[in-house]
Amino acid sequence: MIKSTSNFDVVPPYFALHLLRCVGPSATYDERATFVTFLKHFLLTSLFTGESEASERGQVMMQLARASRASFLNTINNHRDGKALASKIGLGNGFLSLHRTSDFAIHSFKEGQLFGEACHIMSYKQACELEPRIANLPISYNLEAVHRVDDFTANSAIYIQDLIDKIKERGVEYRCGSEGMIDDISQVEVVNRQLASVSKQRQPRFKVTTADGLTHNFDYIVLAAGVNTPLIARKLDIAKYCPTYPLRGYSLTIYTNHSKDTESGNFLNMPFSIDDMYCSSVSPNMARIAGFGELVGYRDKAINIPSLAPMIMARYAKSLFPDSDASEKNALQCFRPCSPDDLPIVGEVKTSPGVFMHTGHGTLGWTISHATSECLAQAMYDRIKGNESRRTYYLSDGIQVDANRLSPNRFL
Ligand SMILES: Cc1cc2nc3c(=O)[nH]c(=O)nc-3n(C[C@H](O)[C@H](O)[C@H](O)COP(=O)(O)OP(=O)(O)OC[C@H]3O[C@@H](n4cnc5c(N)ncnc54)[C@H](O)[C@@H]3O)c2cc1C
């Protein structure tokens, strides 16, 4: 095992499943139930929907990614301090996907073309010219690359903080656990089951209890607690609308001994992917490798379950960045809310007016959530105004997405 994972000519494993951790005695009853619900929908999707259906789902994801990008760039362009923000978030463009065979490169290129993305195939040598670090990979044969010209990379933490500051300026009250204002949500209850004319009701419909024992009343709620969303959905008796499950991944951030002065202000000229790992940088002396998909249960139980991922990532990081602090000890576990059909879950729950979901973004939350949050806003607007629920979401760049595709009601 060790031998095969240390040879760069062998593609490392991406996926791992620890069934016992998902359904065994260490999992709670609710955690087990969410795995069974996820698995059922995953199998139904894999066994009973064919290639064309998978391609349609891929197309929806691509549309969401394009709409997200357009909306993100509009926000930067219309920002009162757009240039400063762009440099602060390390806005770089272009992306290289590296492939071990021509067939894989051609497939990736055709996929890009099919979805209207500007891309072209290039040789390993050309890819190394765009991003010289790629040449450090000790693979004994030449890779092939697809250059996606219009991809953008940015530091999402800085960008999100800017958005938070903006909504606060507009008078929106923002509460967050890290500011000590809302502790962990421990209970969500429906206190008023009256369904008619939600917008005119006097009594709030939902009571949310936080870990500090305080309660908060709301007319509408959006379940968007990442991997914990299906557990909260169970408390509201709407678990079947949220068949997501935590997918463990790893992220390894390395710091180089020196800074690099590139146009975008990032250490790498261009982010790239290799063997299902993504390598990007959003500052002059750091780079991050992220990847892996493991079904090993919920965070608190999974934390001590070993994985090959840190060792593999550190091996790639040490080769790519010999001038850095790359070490497997620095690899961090992260858990993404994975949807069984790969599409996010966005919209109102049919049997619970006023309850919305925004989850299931899997490994692509930063890529598509600008668009999915716009979908959510449109769905909520309809509910608040008492309109019929819309069938189509209208997004940036003239992109339209079928609301049913994202709806939590699609799993019934
Ligand atoms: C290593 C790694 C790298 C990634 N890289 C990329 C990338 O390059 N591009 C990309 O598009 N996507 C990437 N992703 C995926 C992206 O991070 C996820 O899709 C996204 O974070 C999901 O967003 P979310 O809001 O659903 O969940 P989260 O980001 O997990 O947010 C959920 C929030 O809910 C809070 N919460 C949970 N339970 C409770 C509770 N009971 N009470 C109160 N609060 C609660 C949590 O504290 C958290 O703040 C990456 C993920 C990982 C793990």
Image (cartoon, rainbow, N blue to C red):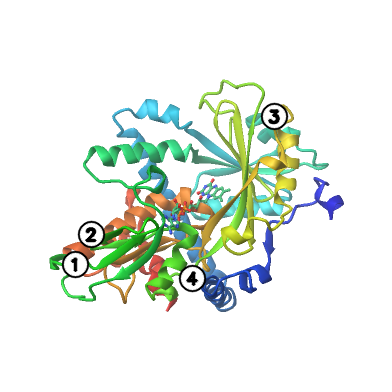
On the image, numbered disc 3 is attached to which residue?
Answer: 324
- Residue reaching furthest to the front: 213
Amino acid at circle 3: Ser
**Badge 1 vs badge 2, beta-carbon distance below 8 Å:** yes
Q: Is residue 216 left or right of residue 196?
A: right
Amino acid at circle 2: Tyr
**Badge 3 vs badge 4, beta-carbon distance below 8 Å:** no
Mark 3 and mark 2: Cα distance apart in space: 49 Å
Give me the residue at 34% from left, 40% from top.
163
Q: Does the residue tagged 1 have its C-beta within 8 Å of any atom of ligand 1?
A: no
- Residue 243 is marked as 4
Q: Nearer the viewer, mark 3 or mark 2?
A: 3
Q: Find residue 80 and report its horizontal and vertical position in percent.
A: 28, 29
Dot 2, how many residues are within 10 Å of its Cα: few (below 14), some (14-19), or many (20+)? Answer: few
- Residue 381 is marked as 2
Amino acid at circle 1: Asn
Q: Earlier in the sequence, mark 2 or mark 4?
A: 4
Give me the residue at 58% from left, 53% from top.
110
Q: Label 4's element?
A: loop
Q: Label 1's element?
A: loop
Q: Earlier in the sequence, mark 1 or mark 2?
A: 2
Q: Nearer the viewer, residue 216 or 146?
A: 216
On the image, numbered disc 1 is attached to which residue?
Answer: 387
Q: Earlier in the sequence, mark 3 or mark 2?
A: 3
Mark 3 and mark 4: Cα distance apart in space: 41 Å
Q: Is residue 333 above or below residue 319?
A: below
